[in-house]
Image (cartoon, coloured by chain):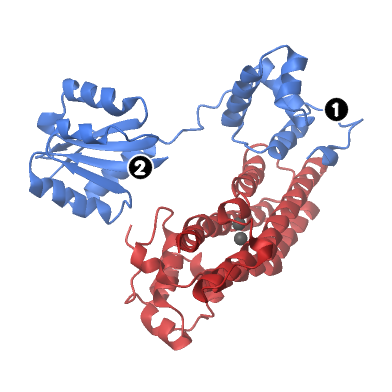
């Protein structure tokens, strides 16, 4: 797979992978960019070019892993991006999935217990994911920022974080990843179709997108953020 | 499973050429060797999916045995033959006269094949249904083992099979499946309390 380069036009990115639309929005890029290249828009909006390319490339290619010199951007940027993604889930994806689920439910003919069950499953899943996001916002990200500050100013880490480490703090992703897959697969394979097909497709489209975005999000946390933080943790221990 | 690409070919120009083509697409570590014996230095590799490219002359059963002996127990090994001409190519061979895109496609296909496949669907056995029902009711492996008079090890292996057959991994997902298929008496139990 070819990876995006600084000289690629932003329009090309979207034409080749339209899932990147919300991703570029998180950087503050909005449509109408004419023939501007990635390099140009990053410069205009004051965005770290390597950081932007790393994010769009991990999103497009699951196996993509940036070379060391490209991970030199600050974890602060990464955390800012991750929090924006959490907000996107809370403010847009969850409500959107729910709107579509409600429509699907209201299209149901006959007994709808099974669809209700899907709804309960979704609600449980949402609860769990929200807890995961909160955990990161309240524990993981503040710890990383404190660690970074201590490292840059050559100060001690606040006492509160004495027993923290990135590996023990970042919650697991397997659970949340598995459940959204299961939700999708149960509807596809096992649910009696007592509903309107188009409404169900719309619901599934949203779930597919959610799953894709979540997997990418987890990859960024587990691969890029984790590695950056481990390096700082190491440097502090041996500094 | 992490992958590693091993290219074994006597000609440096082919080793390096193939490496240059493949690394654009496959971001794994590469090992380039002129001879099969040189693999001895890598006997510590483990838990990897090894894709071994062998020149046509090196693709002998003896060499495969040697590699299997050295790395087969700890890793998953898969072979691709590097031929010169593209005549009579099999699915697991590439030819140096081929275009890079075709070589890449062949490698992708080979990697794809090794992914576990869910399509050999078959119905759950009676025993698996018993286990699934108890899982859905919230029982632990230990409890299930006691109730069904089987070992925990057996419970775990049933659960693995159930997950593979149904394509559902989480406990709550399995519970939904059990309820949908009327394996649980929902007259007396509120289904949402189980999920
Ligand atoms: Fe997150
Ligand atoms: Fe996370």
**A154 over A130 or under it: above or below:** below
**B136 over A206 or under it: above or below:** above
The quarter of the picture where residue A207 lies is: bottom right
Split into quadrants, the picture shows ligand 1 in the one at bottom right
Can you tell which mark lies on residue B3? 2
Query: How many numbered discs, if any?
Result: 2
Tell me which residue sits at (68%, 16%) in the image: B127
Query: Which quadrant of the figure contains the N terminus of chain B?
Result: top left
Considering every residue shown, the one lying at the far top of the view is B149
Tell me if B125 is positioned left or right of A68 in this view.
right
Q: Where residue B111 sits: x, y (%)?
A: 35, 40
Q: Chain of mark 1?
A: B
**Who comes first in sequence, dot 1 or dot 2?**
2
| Few, some or many residues within 10 Å of mark 1 (<14, 14–19, 20+) | few
Find disc 1 in the rendering and name its residue.
B185
Q: Where residue B122 sits: x, y (%)?
A: 57, 23
């Amino acid at each position: 797979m070819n990876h995006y380069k600084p000289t690629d036009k932003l329009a090309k990115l979207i034409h080749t992978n339209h899932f990147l639309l919300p991703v570029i929005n998180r950087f503050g890029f909005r449509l109408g960019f004419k023939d501007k290249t990635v390099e140009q828009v990053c410069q205009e909006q004051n965005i770290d070019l390597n950081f932007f390319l790393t994010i769009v490339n991990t999103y497009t290619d699951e196996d993509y892993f940036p070379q060391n010199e490209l991970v030199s951007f600050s974890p602060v940027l990464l955390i800012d991006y991750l929090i924006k993604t959490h907000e996107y889930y809370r403010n847009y994806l969850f409500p959107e999935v729910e709107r579509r689920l409600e429509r699907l439910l209201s299209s149901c003919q006959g007994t709808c217990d099974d669809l209700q069950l899907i709804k309960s499953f979704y609600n449980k899943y949402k609860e769990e994911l929200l807890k995961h996001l909160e955990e990161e916002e309240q524990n993981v990200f503040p710890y990383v920022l404190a660690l970074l500050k201590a490292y840059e100013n050559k100060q001690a880490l606040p006492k509160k974080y004495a027993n923290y480490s990135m590996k023990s703090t970042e919650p697991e992703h397997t659970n949340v990843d598995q459940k959204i897959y299961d939700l999708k697969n149960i509807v596809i394979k096992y649910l009696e179709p007592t509903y309107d097909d188009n409404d169900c497709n719309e619901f599934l489209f949203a779930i597919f997108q959610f799953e894709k975005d979540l997997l990418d999000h987890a990859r960024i946390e587990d691969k890029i953020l984790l590695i950056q933080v481990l390096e700082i943790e190491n440097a502090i221990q041996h500094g | 499973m992490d992958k590693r690409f091993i290219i074994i070919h006597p000609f440096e120009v082919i080793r390096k050429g193939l490496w240059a083509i493949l690394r654009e697409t496959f971001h794994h570590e590469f090992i380039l060797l002129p001879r099969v014996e040189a693999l001895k230095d890598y006997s510590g590799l483990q838990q990897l999916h090894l894709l071994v490219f062998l020149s046509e002359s090196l693709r002998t059963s003896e060499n495969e045995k040697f590699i299997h002996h050295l790395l087969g127990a700890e890793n998953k090994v898969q072979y691709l033959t590097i031929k010169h001409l593209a005549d009579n190519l099999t699915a697991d061979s590439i030819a140096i006269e081929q275009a890079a895109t075709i070589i890449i496609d062949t490698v992708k296909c080979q990697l794809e094949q090794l992914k576990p496949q869910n399509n050999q669907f078959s119905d759950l056995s009676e025993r698996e249904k018993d286990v699934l029902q108890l899982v859905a009711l919230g029982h632990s492996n230990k409890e299930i083992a006691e109730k069904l008079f089987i070992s925990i090890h057996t419970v775990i292996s049933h659960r693995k099979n159930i997950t593979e057959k149904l394509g559902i991994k989480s406990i709550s997902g399995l519970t939904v499946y059990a309820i949908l298929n009327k394996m649980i008496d929902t007259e007396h139990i509120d289904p949402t309390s189980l999920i």
